[in-house]
Image (cartoon, rainbow, N blue to C red):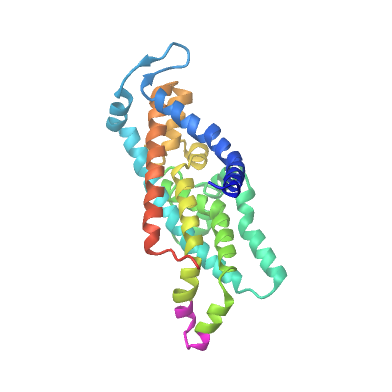
């Protein structure tokens, strides 16, 4: 290897070293420690005892874990679909606004809920959804509809949390997709218009392919965030009613810090990490079929 190649390689290693160090400290080492602890029974206070695959056997037979996995997947799929569809519609609408100050206002207004803490959001929506004096049920009764007790009803508790999470976090997806829309080359849209393509065809044949890398990024981070959902379930419903809103991260928290079953909690964390990695790799693999990169 020439002297120039060595210099370029050394510069490359120096540039990636901060990210590699952070990955090692905050992801690789904790995951390795959790993987090792998942083969032990440990309550923090007494020495750990080797359990082999005992924690994993218990995990796969645990009905609470089955409920948590099911709720997490339902929440994740619902959230990702709504985020991508509504985020794209909002981004398309705001991108067409002509006034600069109105565009700034709309971007700020849609992103503002993302800046509010989950504790404040939970208090706000618990009040709004209160069966006695919440304004949601007040207006539904005014329309002649008999409303449910949203956070206690086994049918409506999880959809209510999906809606609340959407209200708080849609701004992230909206901002990402809006930024992606503003990078679509205008000369391609103008050329398609000159060739007689209508708005729908220009959107499908030009905007969507050019936006596809941004859509992939938004889909992946929304999937990862939704699979790790914890705050709304813990603060608003505690996983109830009847475990209908229990999430995987919530179950990990309860086992680790309420029941002090660290080994079992680590086994749950390892399984959730493997699920997230598998889904992310599958998305990247499938992206070759629909993502277009401009050359």
The residue lying toward the viewer, choosing from 133 and 17, is 17
Residue 138, how many percent across, how many down?
Answer: 53, 55
Q: Is residue 40 magenta?
A: no
Relative placement, left or right, of 92 versus 106 is left
Report the front residue among 263 and 117: 263
Residue reaching furthest to the top: 46
At 55% across and 82% down in the image, what residue appears?
190
Instruction: Determine if the magenta segment contains residue 194.
Output: yes
- Residue 105: x %, y % from top left: 69, 64
Q: Is residue 204 above or below residue 289?
A: below
Q: Is residue 190 left or right of residue 108?
A: left
Which residue is rendered at x = 40% and y = 43% of the image?
277
Instruction: Tell which residue pokes out farthest to the front in this image.
Output: 2
Image coordinates for residue 282, horizontal then vertical, percent: 36, 51
- For the stretch drawn in magenta, what is the main secondary structure? helix
> Where does residue 215 sit, x and y in percent of width and height?
48, 61
- The quarter of the picture where residue 122 lies is top right
Q: For this view, does 270 lie left or right of residue 14? A: left
Q: Is residue 51 above or below residue 196?
A: above
Q: Residue furthest right?
A: 101
Foreground residue among 132 and 210 = 210
Task: Give the magenta part as a residue range.
Answer: 193-202
Do we see residue 67 in this rendering?
Answer: yes
């Amino acid at each position: 290897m020439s002297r120039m190649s060595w210099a370029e390689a050394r510069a490359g290693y120096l540039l990636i070293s901060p990210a590699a160090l952070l990955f090692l400290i905050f992801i690789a080492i904790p995951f390795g420690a959790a993987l090792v602890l998942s083969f032990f029974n440990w309550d923090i206070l007494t020495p750990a005892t080797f359990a082999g695959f005992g924690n994993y056997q218990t995990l796969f037979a645990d009905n609470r874990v089955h409920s948590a996995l099911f709720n997490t997947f339902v929440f994740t799929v619902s959230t990702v679909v709504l985020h991508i569809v509504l985020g794209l519609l909002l981004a398309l609408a705001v991108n067409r606004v002509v006034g600069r100050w109105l565009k700034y206002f709309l971007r700020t207004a849609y992103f503002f809920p993302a800046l509010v803490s989950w504790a404040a959001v939970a208090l706000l929506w618990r009040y709004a959804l209160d069966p006695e004096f919440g304004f949601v049920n007040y207006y539904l009764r005014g329309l002649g509809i008999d409303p449910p007790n949203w956070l206690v009803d086994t049918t409506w508790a999880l959809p209510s949390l999906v809606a609340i999470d959407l209200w708080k976090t849609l701004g992230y997806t909206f901002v990402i997709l809006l930024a992606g829309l503003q990078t679509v080359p205008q000369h391609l849209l103008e050329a398609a218009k000159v060739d007689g393509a209508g708005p729908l065809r220009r959107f499908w044949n030009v905007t969507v392919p050019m936006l596809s890398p941004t859509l992939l990024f938004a889909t992946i981070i929304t999937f990862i965030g939704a699979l790790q959902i914890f705050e709304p379930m813990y603060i608003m419903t505690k996983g109830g009613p009847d475990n209908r809103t229990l999430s995987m991260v919530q179950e990990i928290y309860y086992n680790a810090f309420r029941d002090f079953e660290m080994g079992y909690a680590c086994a749950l964390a390892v399984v959730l990490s493997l699920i997230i990695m598998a889904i992310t790799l599958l998305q990247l693999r499938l992206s070759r079929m629909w993502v277009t990169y401009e050359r």
